[in-house]
Amino acid sequence: MSHTPSNAPPHAGAITDVAGIEVGHFSDPRRPTGCTVVLTREGAVGGVDVRGAAPGTRETDLLSPGNLVQQVHGIMLAGGSAWGLAAAEGAMRWLEERGIGLDVRFGTLPIVPAAVLFDLPMGDARIRPDASAGYAACEAASTQTPAEGNVGAGSGALVGKLFGVDRAMKGGIGNASITVGGVTVGALIACNALGDVIDPDTAQVVAGARTADGRALLDTRRALMRGELPKPLLAGTNTTIGVVATDAVLTKVQANRLAMVAHDGLARSINPVHTMSDGDTLFALATGRVPLEGDAPGMTVLGAMAAEVVARATLRAVLAAQSVRLGGLHIPSAAALVAANGQPSPL
């Protein structure tokens, strides 16, 4: 396995700019796979919205506004398809050892919802994140700006697979944040989309399906509209997953609404999105440091901020990615494809 070097895109904020949020990655050295944990040691009000038709998730029902649990202590994002959900067990163990969780009288129970993406084509599919990987991600967690690209849950991510993996490009993980009126919203996105990734400001395809010779971007949307047929797809073999976090005080109903409108950011940056072969899932966390009163922005502005940071983080996931060569499979990054065509770097 080898990769070409890449420079991360210019800093655009990070989910760890939100007070009370820590992020840790585990990247498996044996093949491109891994997991990423978002920790909220003091607890955070949580919400979730699942839009893809083939999700792999854990503990999402408890985030429904009508259900009992009010706070979560971490979110696990992992590769490995459904097997990768085991990484959440490692996070639970790590948190329990530190006395973090819900007091259930007979013990301290950490609440760690999770979502996974499908990265099994990248090397030996028997290697996938497990409880020890989740524990290691927690050990690495900090408030520093998280690494992006081919790390953690983005290690084995690919984008643009509608016309075959051999014409896909490297996905990854990215993050971004915005502060308006004293309130911060950040996003962390692991992008393994079936569709192309679009620059939301220019509407130009940045990474995705390539032409048959592999030298240029195909533009999946236009190819489909002119009648080009995709290859047969196995459900659930893609998926973009992530976390939107804010330091605002939100109710559980509001947190779920934030997760819902945050998907607008995926719609701006991925095309097609929310397909039958994607399990697109976004969690929302509110750490409750800033009341929404006085001159603070309300839910309409928070929703706009959430969609914006999700779109930016998705774009950064592919701009920070590095090319991968695995056996006979060569997956170029956005930067490498641009360089190969003698064009200026998109970074």
Image (cartoon, rainbow, N blue to C red):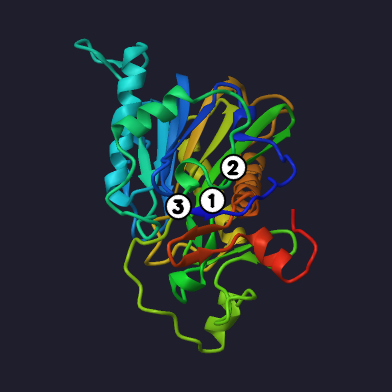
The answer to which of 275 and 86 lies nearer the viewer is 86
How far is mark 1 from mark 3, CA to CA? 7 Å
Image position of 54 with respect to 16: above or below:
below
Query: Would residue 113 be seen by someone viewing this image from the given angle?
Result: yes
CB within 8 Å, label 2 to label 1: yes
User: Residue at position x 46%, y 26% from top?
Assistant: 39
Looking at the rendered structure, the secondary structure element under dot 2 is loop
Name the residue that disc number 1 marks.
172
Mark pair 2, 3: CA separation: 13 Å
What residue is shown with label 3? Answer: 156
SS for callout 3: loop
Residue at image point 43% right, 62% down: 327
Q: Earlier in the sequence, mark 2 or mark 1?
A: 2
User: Percent from the top left, x then y, of residue 171?
Assistant: 54, 56
The outermost residue toward the left is 106
Q: What residue type is disc 3 on?
A: Gly
Tell me residue 330's x, y (percent). Answer: 51, 65
Mark 2 burial class by Cα count in 10 Å: few <14, some 14-19, many 20+? many
Per the model, the C-alpha gap separating discs 2 and 1 is 7 Å
Where in the figure is residue 184, as x and y percent of width and height?
66, 31
Of callouts 2 and 3, the N-terminal one: 2
- x and y, in percent, of residue 24 in the image: 49, 30
Residue at screen point 63% across, 54% down: 315
Number of numbered discs overlaid on the protein picture: 3
Q: In the figure, 321 relative to 58: above or below? A: below
Q: Secondary structure at mark 1?
A: strand
Pick the front one: 2 or 40: 2
At horizontal 61% and vertical 37% (from top left) the residue drawn is: 186
Q: Identity of the amino acid at label 2? A: Glu
The image quarter in which residue 55 lies = bottom left
Residue holding disc 2? 148
Q: Earlier in the sequence, mark 1 or mark 3?
A: 3
